[in-house]
Amino acid sequence: MQVIKYYQSENQEHWREEIGKGDWSAAELLHDWLEEGKLKQICGEATEVYLLTDGDKLVSFATLAPQDEIDAPELSPWIGFVYTFPAYRGHRNAGKLITHICDILKSAGTEKVYISTDEIGLYEKYGFTFWQTMANREGKPTRVYVRNFD
């Protein structure tokens, strides 16, 4: 398995279509934003999509972005759109991607990273702690987790 960056990939169309095959509404949203060129407009120019691949198959994906679904510019960066395809679940593949992203952030001197989710018990395995409940851009409550890099 290999981690690649969507925006540096020579085959963005293939990876975008693979993202769109996800059985999660946010996968469809991410696909659409990539296709329409809106992701960086919405989440920030520094946004990257990380892909855990198995040959030409997409295993997991996640974004690293200055902003996510919480309208709080003072909180940054965010890991978002974390997804693993059903055939690859149960092997901590999302965790491999999260660890990869966190290693990049730590080496860059980033102090912390945030995740907005309704999941409980998933991100704690990867060093995140519940911080607080906040309203997302639609006004719905979501749990915000933070991971500090010491």
Image (spheres, rainbow, N blue to C red):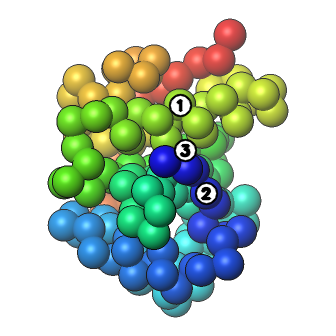
Q: Nearer the viewer, residue 129 or 95?
A: 95
- Viewer-nearest of discs 3 and 1: 1
Picture coordinates of residue 98, whole percent (x, y): 49, 37
Picture coordinates of residue 19, whole percent (x, y): 38, 71
Q: Which mark is residue 99?
A: 1
Q: Secondary structure at mark 3?
A: strand
Count residues near mark 3 (Cα–Cα under 10 Å), then give few for <14, some for 14-19, many for 20+.
many
Picture coordinates of residue 124, whole percent (x, y): 35, 20
- The relative height of residue 107 versus residue 93 in the rendered view (above or below) is above
Q: Which of disc 1 and disc 2 is earlier in sequence?
A: 2
Q: Which of disc 3 and disc 2 is earlier in sequence?
A: 2
Count residues near mark 2 (Cα–Cα under 10 Å), then give few for <14, some for 14-19, many for 20+.
some
Q: Nearer the viewer, residue 29 or 21?
A: 21
Residue tagged by mark 2?
Answer: 4
Q: Nearer the viewer, residue 25 or 125?
A: 125
Residue tagged by mark 3?
Answer: 78
Taking the spot 80% from the left edge, 33% from the top edge, the residue there is: 108
**Residue 104 in sight here:** yes
Compared across the picture, whether 145 is left or right of 83 comes to: right
For the C terminus, the image quarter is top right
Picture coordinates of residue 55, whole percent (x, y): 47, 62
How many marks the image carries: the answer is 3
Q: Which of disc 1 and disc 3 is earlier in sequence?
A: 3
Q: Secondary structure at mark 1?
A: helix
Compared across the picture, whether 75 is left or right of 111 comes to: left
Residue at far right of view: 108
